[in-house]
Structure formats: C-alpha cells, structure tokens
Image: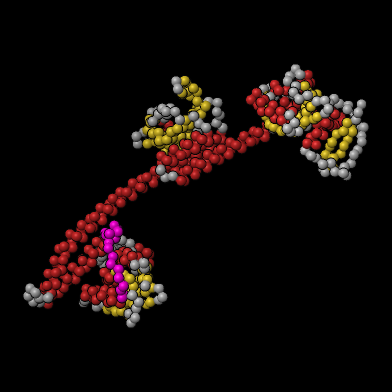
C-alpha cells in the first residue's frame, strides 16, 4: 500500500506529511488539495521542512479536523457528477448522511434548488471541457428539512491517463447572503429616504412634488399601484392628488365617513404605517393584494396619506415601515411648505395688482392736482407783481404763503409722478455734462425763497474748480432741494445748513450738514424707505409724507452714486452724497 502526502500550511512554510491511507478517500482528499495548490500557483519555499511520518494518529487527527470543519469535501468519479468516491462526514450540517449520498440512493443534484441547477451545470462544463482548471460559484440547495441554504462551491479538475475526475469544496454561506440581503434592504431604505428628502427640498409645486415622490417610491419598492391623498378638513374629505397604476383602482375622493379616524388629524392620531390584505379586481380577475398606508404630517397635524399596493407574497419588514414613517414626515413638511408658498404667491399677485392700482391712482391723482395748481401758482405770482392792483403788507404776506405752499405742493406732486413713472420704467432722464456748483446754487436759491423769516442760515463752501458730471439737471436739483428742505424742517430758529464739496480722482463728495434735532440711531436705516416718517403719529410736530428722501435715493442710484446719513440726536445731521465723475 502506497504512502500518501498531505500539505498543511504553517505560516510561510508548507510541511509535507506522508501517511498510510488508513481512512477511505484520504488519498483522494490529498489529491484534491494538491490540485488546488497547483491551480492557485502556490509556491513551496526551498527551505520548507519535509517530514516523513508514518503515524496513524496523525492521520486520524487530520480526518477529524476535516470532518469538523465548515468546508464539505467531495471527490467525484468521472465527470458526470453522479458517483461520489469520497464525501466528508460534515455534510451532516445540512442534515444528510454521507453514506446515503455515496450510495447513489440520493443524488447530490437533487439537493440543488431547481432554478439554480442549470447555472451549476454551466460552470462545471467549463471544468469538464478543460477551459478552466478551477471554478467557483454560488447557488442554493435544500437541507434535509426543506429549508433553502446558500453555498459556495469550488471545483478542481484532476486529469490522469484514462479519465477526468474532479473534487469540490462546499461552504455554507447562508449567513453571509442574509447579511447581504439586509444590507440591500438598508441601501434601498436609505435611497428612499434620500430621494424623499432631495425631492422635498427641490420643489415648491405640490403636484410636481407628489408625482415625483410617488414615482421614486414606485421604482424603489416595485409596487402594483400607489396614490397620494391630501386632506381637506373643511370639506371632510381626502382628494387623490397623485396616482400611478391601473385606471380606477383608487377612488378620486375619500370622505370622513369612510376613514373617520384617519382624517380627523388630531394629535392622538397614530402616525405608524398601516398594513392590511385585501382583494382587487385586475382585468376582471379578483386578486389578493397587500395595502400599505402611511401618513403625511407636519408636526402633529395630518395633512394627507400615501397608499401603496403590493403583491400579497411581498412581505413588508418593520424597518421598511419605519423608513416610510420618516418619509411621511419629510413629505408632509415639504407639502406644507409648498402650500404656504402657493398662498404667498397668491398674496404676492394680489399685492402686485394693488400696487398697479396704486400706481395708476398716483398717476391720475398727480395729473388732476397739477392742472389746478398751475392756475393757483400763476395767479398768485401775478398778484405778487401787482398786476391786479397793489397789495398791502398783510395781503403780500398772505399771498407769499400761497406761492410758497403751492411750490411745496408742486414738488410733492412731481415726486409722486416721478415715483409712479420710475416704477414702471417710463421716466425719461435727460443726461448732460453738468457743473454741480450751479445745481447746488440753484437748489439753495429755491429753498431760501421758501424759508424766509425762519432765521435759518444756508451757506456753502464750493471749490473754484470742479470737474463736471454726467447727469439730469432737473432731477439733481430736486434731490438737493429735498435734502436742504428736509434739514430746514428739523432745525429750530437761527439754525445753520452748510453745503460743502470735495473732489477725488473718481468721485465728487457732497456734504449737507445741519445743526437740527438729529435722528434717533435706530431709525436711520429706514429714512430712505418710501412713505417712512421718523414721527409717524397723528400728533406729529413736523409735516411731510415720507417721499423726499426716497426720491433722493432713487435719483442718486440712477446716477450710479451712493447716499448715506450720519446723525447724532440733539446735535445735528450730515447727509453724504457720492457721485462719480
């Protein structure tokens, strides 16, 4: 009887042991292992220690090791996979007896899951035809109880002069497959959550949002049908806003009488998904389906629900239900945001309509006011010049008040008209090279005429030489008149207003400084707002409607400049204007 050799690895060495073939099939196992080493091109170092033992106890120990390992070893006679020459006893981990399989009363192929048998035979064909010396593949087989197990098989070819044999090593990988399945479910759940969150953050249109979410869930969960209902608590019904699936499977509306507890939307309504089985009519055929329903809610308020239909054999795990519960929260908040956006949009459109009406009203009002004002101002000026007879001092004083206030009213009407036209983009500017000294002097002369008798000194410090700017004469004059006139309103008697100009390489800087009452610090950011008044009460001491400074800011911006104010309450205010040359 010939000796046999067993290769056993110890770190980087391969020790070769020789045994008498005390146990059946041991030499076949050795051949299989040797072929595996050769197939994997394993290298045996020169320094490997070769020990020749003729030790029966060592052989017993090795057989015990193999039979108690997770790897089942098979050696087939011939290439038809019908007769086993050797099978390790640890096949018992699948509930089978090694002798029964070796006897041929139970064929190994009968253990293989029917749908996987062709797949296994295709891999073995590569081995038999000599295309590969070693093949590895995974498939399912039944254990003795009928349960399905996943295994990984590595088959190795052995050739001799007369025939072709091969051996196999089989390992149970059921736990690994179950772990992979769990991971795939988790990946799918994460994909559902990500899609829901992503879509919720991308759309503010309710219908687009619901259709996109439903399509994503349908693709990821492989549903038969699905619908999204939005609840209207006032009409006591839920309306179908998005749907995929066969026509007519879901009702367009569901009333409270049908799902009272679902739709009431109270804080004690359970938010957990609901699962139930039922029957549906599919093309005239009654089929059983699993129906899943989960709520869409924002905070503690139910705003809708999603209904999904699955094949009855499809099982919904607890983790998937928890994911859908979170999806309901995300989509519920997104729907509420989209609904609020729709309300805001409608309010905005209403405001735009009101704003349009206001602009039209201002345009008509300014036209209607301006026509009689021209007559008032014209006749007042004729009276002042004595065209209708000489006026006494009292009459001149009264007439001057009429002229002065008609001029103020004209500026107010001009400001209203300017704002109206500017908002529409219809105001026509007339830009030309200008000397700011002339503009400021004209503005000061206009204001001085209106401020006679108030004891307010208006002075200027203007340079002898000044670069010109490109601007609109009428609008810039209006701007300086408004600023100086605004300073006059907030100065007590015998105050002073000083206008200064400085020039640098790029800009001309104008400062208009007064020693009036000043502006409270917290109100400075709003003084350029339309119709804003520092004292907006009905008992305010200072007149005005809050147009002047807003108009000034618009004019400065049209000239690509900037305007700002610095003020100290009780000390005075300085208005800064920076205009490019």
**555 displayed left or right of 160:** left
Question: Looking at this view, is 288 or 169 the one in front?
Answer: 169
Residue 34 image-quadrant placement: top right
Residue 283 image-quadrant placement: top left
Q: Is residue 423 magenta?
A: yes
Q: Is residue 405 above or below residue 241?
A: below
Q: Is residue 319 magenta?
A: no
Q: Position of residue 507 (x, y in %)?
A: 38, 73
Q: Position of residue 49 (x, y in %)?
A: 89, 41
Question: Looking at this view, is 132 or 93 the one in front?
Answer: 132
Q: Position of residue 104 (x, y in %)?
A: 76, 19
Q: Position of residue 311 (x, y in %)?
A: 52, 27
**351 displayed left or right of 379:** right
Q: Is residue 508 above or below residue 414?
A: below
Q: Which residues are magenta?
A: 420-436
Which residue corresponds to the image point at 92% horizontal and 26% vertical from the top-left? 1
- The single residue placed furthest to the left in the displayed view is 389
């Amino acid at each position: 009887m010939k000796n046999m050799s067993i290769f056993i690895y110890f770190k980087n060495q391969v020790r070769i042991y020789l045994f008498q073939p005390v146990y059946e099939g041991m030499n076949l196992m050795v051949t299989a292992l040797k072929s595996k080493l050769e197939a994997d091109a394993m290298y045996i170092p020169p320094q490997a220690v070769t020990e020749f033992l003729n030790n029966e106890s060592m052989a017993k120990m090795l057989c015990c090791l193999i039979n108690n390992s997770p790897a089942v070893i098979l050696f087939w006679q011939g290439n038809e996979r019908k007769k086993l020459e050797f099978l390790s006893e640890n096949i018992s981990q699948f509930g089978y007896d090694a002798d029964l399989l070796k006897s041929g009363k139970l064929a190994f192929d009968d253990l293989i899951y029917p749908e996987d048998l062709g797949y296994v035979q295709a891999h073995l064909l590569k081995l038999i035809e000599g295309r590969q010396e070693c093949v590895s593949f995974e498939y399912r087989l039944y254990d003795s109880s009928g349960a399905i197990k996943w295994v990984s098989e590595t088959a190795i070819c052995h050739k001799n002069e007369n025939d072709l044999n091969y051996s196999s090593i089989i390992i149970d990988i059921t736990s690994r497959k179950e772990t992979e399945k769990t991971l795939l479910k988790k990946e799918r759940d994460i994909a559902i959550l990500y899609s829901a969150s992503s879509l919720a953050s991308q759309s503010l249109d309710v219908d687009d949002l619901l259709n996109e979410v439903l399509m994503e869930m349908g693709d990821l969960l492989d549903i038969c049908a699905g619908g999204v209902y939005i609840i209207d608590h006032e009409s006591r019904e839920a309306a179908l806003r998005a749907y995929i699936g066969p026509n007519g499977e879901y009702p367009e509306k569901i009333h409270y009488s049908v799902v009272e507890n679902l739709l009431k939307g109270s804080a004690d309504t359970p938010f957990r998904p609901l699962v139930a089985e039922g029957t549906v009519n599919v093309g005239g055929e009654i089929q059983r389906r699993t129906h899943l329903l989960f709520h869409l809610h924002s905070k503690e308020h139910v705003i809708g629900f999603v209904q999904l239909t699955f094949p009855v054999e499809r099982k919904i795990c607890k983790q998937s239900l928890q994911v859908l519960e979170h999806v309901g929260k995300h989509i519920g908040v997104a729907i509420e945001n989209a609904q609020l956006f729709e309300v805001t949009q409608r309010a905005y459109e209403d405001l735009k309509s009101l704003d349009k009406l206001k602009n039209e009203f201002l345009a008509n009002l300014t036209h209607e006011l301006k026509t009689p004002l021209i007559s008032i101002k014209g006749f007042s000026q004729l009276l002042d010049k004595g065209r209708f007879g000489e006026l006494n001092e009292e009459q001149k004083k009264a007439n001057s008040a009429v002229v002065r206030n008609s001029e103020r009213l004209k500026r107010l009407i001009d400001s209203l008209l300017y704002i109206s036209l500017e908002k529409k983009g219809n105001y026509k500017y007339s830009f030309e090279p200008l000397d700011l000294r002339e503009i400021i002097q004209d503005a000061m002369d206009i204001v001085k005429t209106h401020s006679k008798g108030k004891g307010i000194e208006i002075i200027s410090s203007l340079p002898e030489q000044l670069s010109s700017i490109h601007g609109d004469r009428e609008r810039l004059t209006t701007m300086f008149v408004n600023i100086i006139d605004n300073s006059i309103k907030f100065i007590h008697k015998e105050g002073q207003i000083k206008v200064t100009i400085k020039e640098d390489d790029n800009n001309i800087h104008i400062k208009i400084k007064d020693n009036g009452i000043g502006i409270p610090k917290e109100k400075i950011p709003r003084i350029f707002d339309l119709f804003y008044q520092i004292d907006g009460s009905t008992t305010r001491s200072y007149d005005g409607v809050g147009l002047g400074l807003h108009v000034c800011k618009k004019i400065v911006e049209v000239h690509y400049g900037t305007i700002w104010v610095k003020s100290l309450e009780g000390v005075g205010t300085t208005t800064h204007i920076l205009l490019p040359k």
